Image (cartoon, grey):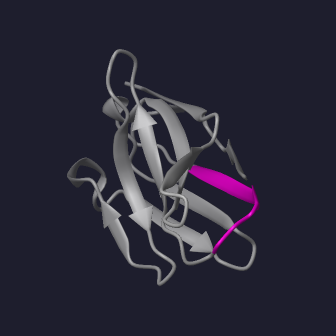
Amino acid sequence: QVLLVESGGGLVQAGGSLRLSCAASGTIFSLNTMGWYRQAPGKARELVATITSGHSTNYTDSVKGRFTISRDIIKSTMALQMNNLKPEDTGVYYCNYHSRYYDHDYWGRGTQVTVSS
């Protein structure tokens, strides 16, 4: 079992910044990929960014150049630095952990990010 807890969400004006954090606990295997997803009201959950154990990263086009994903393997934590936020970034942001062994995705409860114009 893996428990994920997000923090750092809040209300910010367009152009501002926020840093999200995710703390993982339980049966953690450091080689597994982790990532951030988000879901706006009435829309499907979408991928924001992923990061492998080798610190290889991928970002959805809409956040490239503005968001940076990182992780600390030893502490089992992950972060998402979000700069130059836009109203369309508004949504609930979820921490994700994918277990290849169990072929199962684990999710946190999410943290709300609201960007005003």
- Residue sitting at 35 percent across and 47 percent down? 47
Is residue 28 in the magenta section? yes
Residue occupying the far left of the picture = 61
Residue at the limit of the structure toward the top, as seen here: 42
Magenta region, main secondary structure: strand
Q: Nearer the viewer, residue 66 or 94?
A: 94
Residue 101 position in % (x across, y down): 53, 66
- Is residue 78 left or right of 59 when viewed as pictured? right
Considering only vertical position in the picture, is 115 above or below 71? above
Query: In this view of the protein, can residue 11 be seen by the observer?
Result: no
Looking at the image, which residue sits at the far bottom?
54
x 45%, y 69%: residue: 51
Q: Is residue 55 above or below residue 64?
A: below
* Residue 58 sits inside the magenta stretch: no
| Left or right placement of residue 85 versus residue 110 in this view | left
The C terminus - image quarter: top left
- Residue 60 screen position, x and y as percent: 27, 53
Q: Which residues are magenta?
A: 19-29
**Image point 51% across, 79% down: which residue?**
53
Q: Nearer the viewer, residue 32 or 116?
A: 32
Q: What is the x, y in percent for residue 78? A: 61, 63
Please tell me which residue is depicted at 35% across the width and 29% down the height of the picture: 87
Q: How many marks?
A: 0
Q: Give the answer, above or below, for where 113 lies relative to 55.
A: above
Residue 112 appears in view: yes
